[in-house]
Amino acid sequence: MKLRDAVDLLALAAIWGASFLFMRLASPAFGPLTLAFLRVAGAAALLVPILAAQSGLSVWQNKWHLLGVVGLLNSALPFALYAFAALHLPTGLSSILNATVPMWSALVAWLWLGLPPTRGRILGLLLGLLGVVALVAAKTGLSLDASAWAVAACLLATLNYAVGAVATQRWLGTMPSLAVAAGSQLGAALWLLPLGLWAWPHQAPDPVAWAHLGALSLLCTGIAYLFYFRLMGRLGATNTVTVTFLIPVFALVWGAIFLGEVLSPALLAGGGLILVGTSLALGLWPRPSPAQ
């Protein structure tokens, strides 16, 4: 991997890790639905003009309904679910649960695309599931309190990400990446528009909360997509997805620095199981032996 690519990968992980911090800070002021709406609306306001400047809007023709479904799965639902979880969970735990996305993607690809996993990947799925159970038990004691519902929201969000990734591959695989990003964010904003306005906070958020929202929308969503798709073009999907392993590291650091969150042994153990399981599910480890 070239130095520039490594720097971009670390920058993307740092930005996406910070998204959990900004959700934790902004969600109490805006509420989950309004925060999710404003997040995707701001990202669309950034990405759509860039696409228009490249004369790329024409590729959306006859694809509006597919972009709308992808926007619902990839952004509208998971962003709202994570914003809800941010009211009850520390940033580190949410980010570690987010690291299960590639694991669920392998499962969805198996069930939808008929791509059966190897024994190693099945072991990875089981290890990842064990890590999730360990985290849930440590955080909630397996009781149905607010934290348990927040964990469930994170897992439902990751499942949406996984289904959305396969749907994008099947339906929009030939569309330019920037067009998919801009169109899906616009579609997500339309899905969330009525809910975001209905749940608009009665008390106006202060300027600090708006600053957190701006960072979440423009930096952690709009600009992050530009980093992501640039890396996809240079490194390919398998190498780029390794950013998943770096995001929790940065999220844990940001949470510890800015929110004073504590790294408990249970969090580290459960998170380690999830990361090992995800690496197995992706086939990133162990590396296959070179052909003789």
Image (cartoon, rainbow, N blue to C red):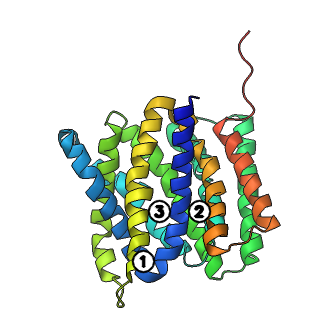
Disc count in the image?
3
Residue 64 visible here: no
- Which secondary structure lies at badge 3? helix
Relative to 111, residue 138 above or below: below
Q: Which of marks 1 and 2 is in front?
A: 1
Q: Position of residue 111 (x, y in %)?
A: 55, 44
Farthest residue, direction bottom = 203
Q: In this view, does 284 lie to the left or right of 4?
A: right
Q: Which of marks 3 and 1 is in front?
A: 1
| Residue type at the position of mark 3 | Pro
Q: Which of the image's four quarters has the N terminus?
A: top right
* Residue at x 51% of width, y 35% of height: 237
> Which residue bears the numbered disc 2?
155
> Which residue bears the numbered disc 1?
209
Q: Quadrant of residue 132?
A: bottom right
> Residue 78: which numbered mark, if any?
3
| Residue type at the position of mark 2 | Leu
* Residue at x 54% of width, y 65% of height: 20
Q: Are marks 3 and 1 in contact (CB under 8 Å)?
A: no
Relative to 155, residue 104 above or below: above
Q: Position of residue 244 (x, y in %)?
A: 59, 48
Q: Is residue 264 left or right of residue 30?
A: right
Residue nearest the observer in this picture, 21 or 283: 21
CA gap, disc 3 to disc 1?
21 Å
The tag earlier along the polypeptide, 3 or 1, is: 3
CA gap, disc 1 to disc 2?
26 Å
- Which secondary structure lies at badge 1? helix
Q: Where is residue 272 in the image (x, y as percent from the top left)?
A: 76, 53
Q: Quadrant of residue 33?
A: bottom left
Q: In this view, does 193 lie to the left or right of 221?
A: left
Q: Which of the image's four quarters has the C terminus?
A: top right
